[in-house]
Each structure stands twice: as C-alpha cells, then as structure tokens.
C-alpha cells in the first residue's frame, strides 16, 4: 500500500511541475528532466528529481471502515478466468451529468474480453479488449398478435426469458405454458406461442436478456482508464492485463450497495532536488517550483484529496561537473509534508434478481433440493452464476486521482 500510494503522489507532483514549467520561455527544456529518481540516460543541464522521504499512518477508525459504496456498476469475474485485467470500475460522473442525470448505458451485463491488439487491427497496442453487452429487459408489456401469439421487442438469449400473466403475476413455464419460436440457426426469435389462448382482458409481461452488438476493439494502456467503451463506466486497467482474460461489468438501473470502503490517511514527506549548471538558473527553478506547488497548485490539489501541510527549505551544494573546465553542478533540496487519503473497496456479492413470497410447504420443498437443482426450480430466484459470473473476492484500490490520470 505504501509504495502504491507514494508512486501515485510522485507522479502527481511530476505532472504538476511539468505543467507549470512548459510555459516558461527560458526553461521549457526542463520539462523532460522532471522525473522520479535518477532515471536519466545522460546527466541533464538542469533537472528536478521528485522522491519520497518517508511517511506515517493516521487511523480514522479502529478497523478503518469508512462506509458503504452505492453505485450503478460493479465488477464481476468470469468463471475459470483470472479476472485481474480491470483493477476497478466506478461511475463516470461527468457522463451522467451530460446525460441529464441519468445513467447513459442500459442495465445489463457487459462482458470484457482481452485480446491481442495487432491481431485485431491495433498494430501499436499489444493488448486490446472488446465489450459484448447482454442487456436487461425488465417489465416489458408483450405485444399481442392474436390470443395465442405474442411479439417481444427483442430476441431473448436462450434461457433468460421469464413470462408473467398479468395482472395476477402468474409465472409461465417454458414448454408447458408457452414456446419460443426458433430461427434456422436454432436461436430464439421475438415470437412467443402460448399453449392456451389468453383471454378475459389478461396480458403478458416479460423479463429477459438480449445480446447487443459487440463493441471494439479498444486499446488497453496499463495504469490508465477507459471511459468510452461503456458510457457512464470508468474501466481502470492496471499492470495485470492478460490476453484471454474475461470479466464483466454489471450495470444496475438504480444505485445499489456495491462495496464496503475501508481507508485512512498518510502523512508523506516529499523531497524535490533541483540541479542546474548555472547557479542563477538553479535558484530560479528552486523558488518557482515551490511557488508552483505551494501557492498555485495547492488549492487544486486540496480538492483532489492531497493537502500540502508545510514546506521545508534546504541548503545549497555543488559538485564537480567537469574537472578540466572547472565546471560545477549546483543543487538544492526542498521538502513538503503532504497528507493524503488511501482507500480500498471490498466488493459485495449481489446475486438475487427477484424473489417472491413462498408458502411454508414450498419453502420446505426448495430447502430439500440439492444445489444443482436450485437454479430455476421455483422460477423466482435467478443467480448471476447462471450466465457464468462469480463474485470478486479481492479488495481493490478506490482509484484516487494521480493513479490513473488519463482516459483512453
């Protein structure tokens, strides 16, 4: 956790310094030399090296529990797959706002398939992914053709159709009360045939899932996020991307509990070493770097959960750059005490789609069934395991600003 957090902070401060110095007419060449640690191939004429000097932990509660996360989306795994390519998912607040406050993607299950980039038309990306949506259709009033023939809006995925006789809410059983017309490939069509005509002012209501067109390929950039593949969803890819991996993002019509959040705060000591061959350049870069972070960027960083508490000024030093020419490198160090948050999300298992009251006799019958006979026996309980999904058991980072800075 410590190095994960310090890496994010270092990258954030490097980004802020580069953004500031790229507009200075005399020191634009400094931008590429603002780095973490000494990762230069050749010693630059001037540079800023950002390092972490240490840190101490602040506990906000004995068990670090912060609260429950309510969300339209949560991440799930495919059975038999690693499920590690996507580190975490969350709502894209900007996309929701631009869509008038409503979630821009339809409820359903969005399968993510990680594939080889060059083999799928992305020559410059070693890995990519496709999104295969399986859309939820809930409470659809089925169109009547005649007393025995009804028409759905979409062709349902085999095994997902649940047909109700309304207004009583009586659940029909496929093969007994109705059949779904199949096409030449043996796949369901929109047409439903009843074994007994429906009369007396009754009507049909349907719940089902239907497969939408596949999307992609989308390039994967490690340690970056994608917010375009599934509108309204931020997909954060880490460093565990693997070709052949499959995951799923479940989109819900309203916000449900999706994870438990645990977190706290760290006080970090950041060290900035400024080096230049000209002593006046070194002093100018030193002073303006402090101003860029402590005065200009401080308010913006505060809104992102990074509080600059204090600045410590260090002395100057010099070292020989060229003994023959009697040339020197001049350097100085300043430090900053920074307080920031950490958080992890522990996903919750969300399995029930719908439940109906049972009599005591029915409950005893269901309780006596073995596990392999439970799904679909009562017609009222549907598990996501029926479509090959399982819960994510490993906690994942909440994704603070500075870890995944840009979207692709």
Image (tube, grey):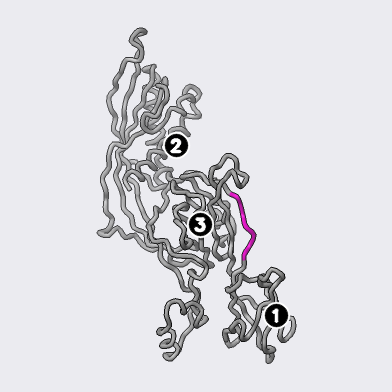
Residue 212 among those drawn in magenta: yes
Which numbered mark, 1 or 2, is in the foreground of this view?
1
Residue placed most toward the observer, 250 or 180: 180
For the view shown, which residue lies furthest in the right direction? 146
Q: Residues within 10 Å of mark 1 (few under 14, many from 20)?
A: some
Residue 327 among those drawn in magenta: no
Quadrant in which the C terminus appears: top right
Q: Position of residue 187 (x, y in %)?
A: 66, 70
Mark 1 = which residue? 150
Mark 2 = which residue? 15
Q: Secondary structure at mark 2?
A: helix
What residue sits 46% from the left and 32% below the top? 18
What residue sits 45% from the left and 88% below the top? 362
Mark 3 = which residue? 246
Q: Does residue 395 sit above or below 296 in this rendering?
A: below
Q: CA distance from mark 1 to mark 2?
A: 60 Å
Q: Position of residue 355 (x, y in %)?
A: 48, 79
Which numbered mark, 3 or 2, is in the foreground of this view?
3
Q: Earlier in the sequence, mark 1 or mark 2?
A: 2
What residue sits 58% from the left and 53% below the top? 130
């Amino acid at each position: 956790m410590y190095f994960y957090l310090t890496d994010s902070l270092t990258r954030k401060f490097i980004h802020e310094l580069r953004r500031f110095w790229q507009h200075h007419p005399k020191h634009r060449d400094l931008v590429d030399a603002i780095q973490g640690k000494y990762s230069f191939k050749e010693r630059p004429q001037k540079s800023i090296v950002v390092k972490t000097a240490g840190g101490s932990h602040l506990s906000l509660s004995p068990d670090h529990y912060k609260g429950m996360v309510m969300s339209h989306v949560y991440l799930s795994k495919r059975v038999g797959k690693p499920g590690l390519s996507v580190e975490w998912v969350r709502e894209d607040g900007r996309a929701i706002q631009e869509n008038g406050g409503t979630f821009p993607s339809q409820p359903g299950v969005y399968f993510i398939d990680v594939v080889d980039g060059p083999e799928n038309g992305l020559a410059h990306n070693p890995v990519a992914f496709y999104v295969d949506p399986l859309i939820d259709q809930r409470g659809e009033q089925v169109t009547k053709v005649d007393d025995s023939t009804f028409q759905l809006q979409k062709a349902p995925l085999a095994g997902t159709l649940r047909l109700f006789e309304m207004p009583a809410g009586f659940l029909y059983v496929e093969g007994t009360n109705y059949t779904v017309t199949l096409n030449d490939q043996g796949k369901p069509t929109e047409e439903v045939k009843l074994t007994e005509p429906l009369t007396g002012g009754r009507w049909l209501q349907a719940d089902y899932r239907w497969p939408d067109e596949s999307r992609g390929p989308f390039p994967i950039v490690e340690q970056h996020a994608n917010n375009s593949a599934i509108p309204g969803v931020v997909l954060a890819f880490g460093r565990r991307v693997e070709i052949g991996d499959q995951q799923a993002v479940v989109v819900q019509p309203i916000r449900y509990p999706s994870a438990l959040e645990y977190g706290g705060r760290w006080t970090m000591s950041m060290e900035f070493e400024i080096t230049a061959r000209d002593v006046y350049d070194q002093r100018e870069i030193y002073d303006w770097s402090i101003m860029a972070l402590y005065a200009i960027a401080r308010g913006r960083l505060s809104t992102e959960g990074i509080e600059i508490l204090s600045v410590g000024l260090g002395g100057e030093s010099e070292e020989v750059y060229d003994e023959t020419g009697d040339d020197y490198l001049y350097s100085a160090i300043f430090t900053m005490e920074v307080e920031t948050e950490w958080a992890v999300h522990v996903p919750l298992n969300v399995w029930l789609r719908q439940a109906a009251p049972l009599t005591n006799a029915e409950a005893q019958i269901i309780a006596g069934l073995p596990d392999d006979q439970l799904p679909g026996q009562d017609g009222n309980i549907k598990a996501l395991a029926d479509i090959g999904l399982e819960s994510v058991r490993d906690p994942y980072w909440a994704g603070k600003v500075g870890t995944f800075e840009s979207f692709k």
